[in-house]
Image (cartoon, rainbow, N blue to C red):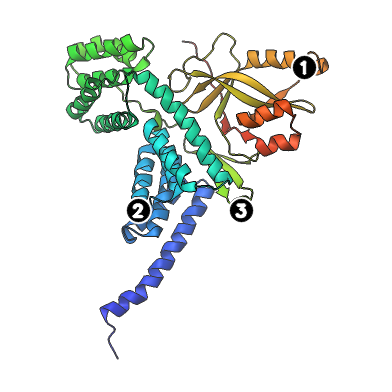
């Protein structure tokens, strides 16, 4: 019996391993479509040990893992995975797009702009739906960046802003690892370069409390409240400080990070591209709260879903701060598509509250109903008070076009962006 060489055995093994990897990749894709993100992670993680460090299959697996970790609220891990994938294939526009989303979820606003810029650049002259999606996200991120840079003050360049963001994320990671002295040094470095956000001083205060340097911590927390008197983390920790001093231990101090909240609501939209760039894009949205898959829904509109939507029923609360992350909301005008029973659909330009951190669009119900009543008072007064549904939004160019030449219902649906999800917030009085 002839004895096969080691080289021969390797050549025979390679196709089998490759087929098994392909089967696992397809299985992970199916798991993601079914909302089994933990299962997709279990399927993909072992593959990274098998795949060559610069292979195209590794890029595909890293991308799947990035999506699965993002939908599991492991946003920092998602960011790391897409970053690694881009070191292998920096010419992939969709990788840059997903990297931009991971940047947004980890509050890397400046880096998100850079990533979306790359996605748009690589899509070239493509006029398809995916290219339009890249351009829309770039526009949104540029608005977010402008707001963030105004909050920072000074005359930062984009490179300086991105460097400050990365220092902050490194400091937050050190806090999660209980590396309090190292975190303190990074927060002080940010502050010394002109960083004036209350988060810098508030987290510096926590780092000092955990080192039992209470006087310095008190000064840092008070400085955070001078910048923003409503900043809850600094206010709460300052209130706890006397008890902490008496007990001589850091009692009740918590590190809270929005990107790790267990009740975050998310949606992942899966796209099936047509045969050409001009072909329509079919998409199904998976809705998820915490670790619970709420179900799937087909979009009414033909465009990508945008924004998380909250119809505010409280007349005496205007949500100048976001009900989820407590950041300041901003006033922005949105073209809302509204269906009023039984058969009336209109586009209404409405100034709304918007939180860039949470992608949350807040419409005050009383104001909206006043505008609807004014609109129908001369044309169809008999339907005032009927049930209505805020269906989604249009892009501003289509809205302006519709003001000159009213859109049909079919044309509205062609241009409609469904909401990613509709959310509610309940007031609790203590």
Q: Earlier in the sequence, mark 1 or mark 3?
A: 3
- What residue is at 33 percent from the left and 12 percent from the top? 227
2 lies left or right of 293: left
Q: Position of residue 90 (x, y in %)?
A: 38, 50
Q: Position of residue 76 (x, y in %)?
A: 35, 38
8 lies left or right of 184: right
**Distance from Cα at disc 2 to Cα at disc 3:** 27 Å
The picture quadrant where one finds residue 342 is top right
Q: Where is mark 3, residue-wise?
A: 274
Q: Earlier in the sequence, mark 2 or mark 3?
A: 2
Q: Position of residue 53 (x, y in %)?
A: 31, 57
User: Can residue 357 be seen here?
Assistant: no
User: Can residue 331 be seen here?
Assistant: yes
Q: Where is mark 1, residue-wise?
A: 376
Quadrant into which the N terminus falls? bottom left
Q: Position of residue 189 (x, y in %)?
A: 21, 25
Mark 1, other Cα within 10 Å: few <14 / some 14–19 / many ≥20: few
**Distance from Cα at disc 1 to Cα at disc 2:** 57 Å
Element assignment for label 2:
helix
Residue reaching furthest to the front: 125
The picture quadrant where one finds residue 168 is top left
The image shows residue 229, relative to residue 63, as above or below, that is above
The image shows residue 353, relative to residue 39, as above or below, that is above
Whether label 2 touches label 3, CB < 8 Å: no
In the foreground, 13 or 330: 330
Mark 2, other Cα within 10 Å: few <14 / some 14–19 / many ≥20: some
Whether label 1 touches label 2, CB < 8 Å: no
Element assignment for label 3:
loop
Q: Where is mark 2, residue-wise?
A: 88
């Amino acid at each position: 019996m002839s004895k096969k060489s080691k080289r021969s055995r390797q050549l025979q093994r390679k196709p089998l391993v490759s087929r098994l990897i392909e089967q696992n990749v397809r299985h992970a894709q199916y798991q993601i479509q079914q909302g089994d993100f933990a299962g997709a992670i279990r399927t993909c993680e072992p593959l990274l040990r098998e795949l060559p460090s610069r292979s195209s299959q590794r890029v595909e697996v890293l991308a799947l893992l990035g999506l699965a970790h993002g939908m599991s609220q492991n946003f920092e891990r998602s960011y790391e995975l897409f970053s690694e994938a881009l070191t292998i294939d920096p010419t992939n526009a969709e990788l840059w797009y997903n990297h931009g989303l991971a940047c947004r979820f980890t509050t890397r606003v400046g880096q998100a702009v850079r990533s979306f810029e790359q996605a748009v650049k690589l899509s070239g002259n493509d006029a398809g739906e995916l290219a339009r999606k890249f351009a829309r996200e770039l526009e949104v991120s540029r608005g977010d960046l402008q707001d963030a840079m105004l909050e920072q003050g000074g005359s930062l360049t984009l490179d300086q802003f991105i460097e400050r963001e990365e220092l902050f994320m490194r400091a937050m990671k050190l806090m999660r690892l209980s590396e309090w002295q190292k975190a303190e040094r990074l927060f002080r470095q940010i502050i010394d370069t002109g960083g004036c956000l209350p988060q810098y001083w508030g987290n510096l205060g926590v780092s000092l409390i955990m080192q039992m340097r209470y006087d310095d911590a008190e000064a840092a927390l008070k400085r955070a409240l001078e910048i923003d008197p409503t900043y809850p983390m600094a206010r709460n920790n300052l209130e706890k400080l006397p008890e902490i001093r008496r007990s001589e231990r850091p009692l009740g101090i918590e590190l809270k990070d929005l990107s790790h909240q267990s009740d975050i609501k998310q949606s992942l939209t899966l796209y099936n591209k047509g045969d050409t760039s001009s072909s329509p894009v079919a998409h199904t949205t998976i809705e998820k709260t915490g670790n619970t898959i709420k179900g799937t829904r087909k979009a009414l509109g033909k465009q990508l879903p945008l924004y998380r939507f909250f119809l505010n029923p409280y007349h005496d609360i205007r949500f100048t701060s976001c009900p989820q992350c407590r950041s300041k909301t901003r006033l922005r005008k949105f073209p809302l598509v509204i269906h009023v029973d039984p058969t009336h659909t209109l586009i209404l330009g409405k100034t709304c509250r918007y939180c860039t951190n949470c992608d949350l669009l807040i419409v005050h119900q009383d104001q909206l109903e006043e505008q609807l009543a004014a609109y129908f008072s001369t044309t169809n007064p008999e339907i005032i008070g009927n049930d209505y549904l805020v269906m989604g939004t249009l892009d501003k160019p289509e809205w302006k076009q519709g003001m000159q030449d009213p859109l049909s219902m079919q044309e509205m649906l062609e241009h409609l962006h469904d909401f990613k999800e509709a959310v509610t917030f309940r007031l609790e009085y203590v």
